[in-house]
Each structure stands twice: as C-alpha cells, then as structure tokens.
Amino acid sequence: MSGRRQVRLRLETRVVPVLDDGPATVEYDGISILCFEDDRLVGTTWVPVGDDPSYADDDALLAAWHAALRWSDFQWEQSGPATGSRHDPTDRR
C-alpha cells in the first residue's frame, strides 16, 4: 500500500424520502467530496448547494474542501518538498 491520496469533487442530486401524508421524496443538489487512498474510497462528505447559494453555503463548501485537500496533502507534508512536488499559487515566476 503506497498511501497515495486523492480528492475528487462530484456534483450530484440526493433523493430523501419524506413520510408526511404518504410516501414522497425531496431532491437536493449538492457536491460530494470523495477521498481516496490507493484508489479505494475511504471517506465522503456531501455539502448541499442551491440555485442561489448564500455566503454560509460557500463557506461550508470551502471548509469541507479545504479539510479534504489538507488530508490529501498529508504524504507531501511528511516527505517534504525534496521528494514531493506541488504548484505554489504565490510563485509568480
């Protein structure tokens, strides 16, 4: 096991059953943040999004995505830049 980690984002709709006055369903659009280690799914976070997302919706999505990216970068942090490589958005060369 190499411990290779990867994060994927996927837009999807979730269908939730509602049992009020009979069987019905409600659909919610959202973004799934999928975490893979060695090509095996090890975690999923789903964040709802709407047609008119609020700042709170944006903040929730960014926080979940940030946490997933930090998780995926664990191996790079452990090995250091001598053996890992990544893009530095602040490098203007």
Image (cartoon, grey):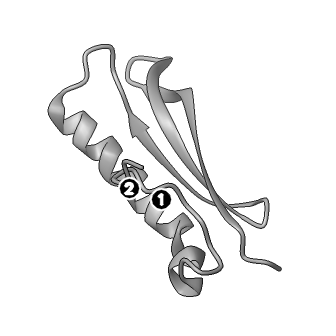
Q: Nearer the viewer, residue 32 or 83?
A: 83
Q: Residue furthest left?
A: 55
Give the secondary structure at mark 1: helix
Residue at 50% in and 79% down: 77
Q: Name the mark on residue 66.
A: 2
Displayed quadrant of residue 81:
bottom right
Residue 25 higher or lower than 67, as above or below: above
Residue bearing the label numbered 1: 69
Q: Position of residue 56 (x, y in %)?
A: 18, 38
Q: Position of residue 9 (x, y in %)?
A: 56, 40
Q: Name the mark on residue 48.
A: none
Residue at 57% in and 75% down: 76
Cα–Cα gap, marks 2 and 1: 5 Å
Q: Badge 2, how many Cα within 10 Å: few under 14, some, many 20+? A: few
Displayed quadrant of residue 10:
top right
Residue at 33% in and 53% down: 90
- From the viewer's perspective, is 1 left or right of 25? right
Q: Nearer the viewer, residue 85 or 40?
A: 85
Q: Position of residue 84 (x, y in %)?
A: 62, 73
Residue at 72% in and 76% down: 3
Q: Residue furthest front?
A: 93
Type of the residue with mark 1: Leu
- From the viewer's perspective, is 75 left or right of 49? right
Type of the residue with mark 2: His
Q: Position of residue 50 (x, y in %)?
A: 33, 20
Question: In which quadrant is the N terminus drawn?
Answer: bottom right
Q: Check whether the beta carbons of the residues at disc 2 and disc 1 lie within 8 A of each other.
A: yes
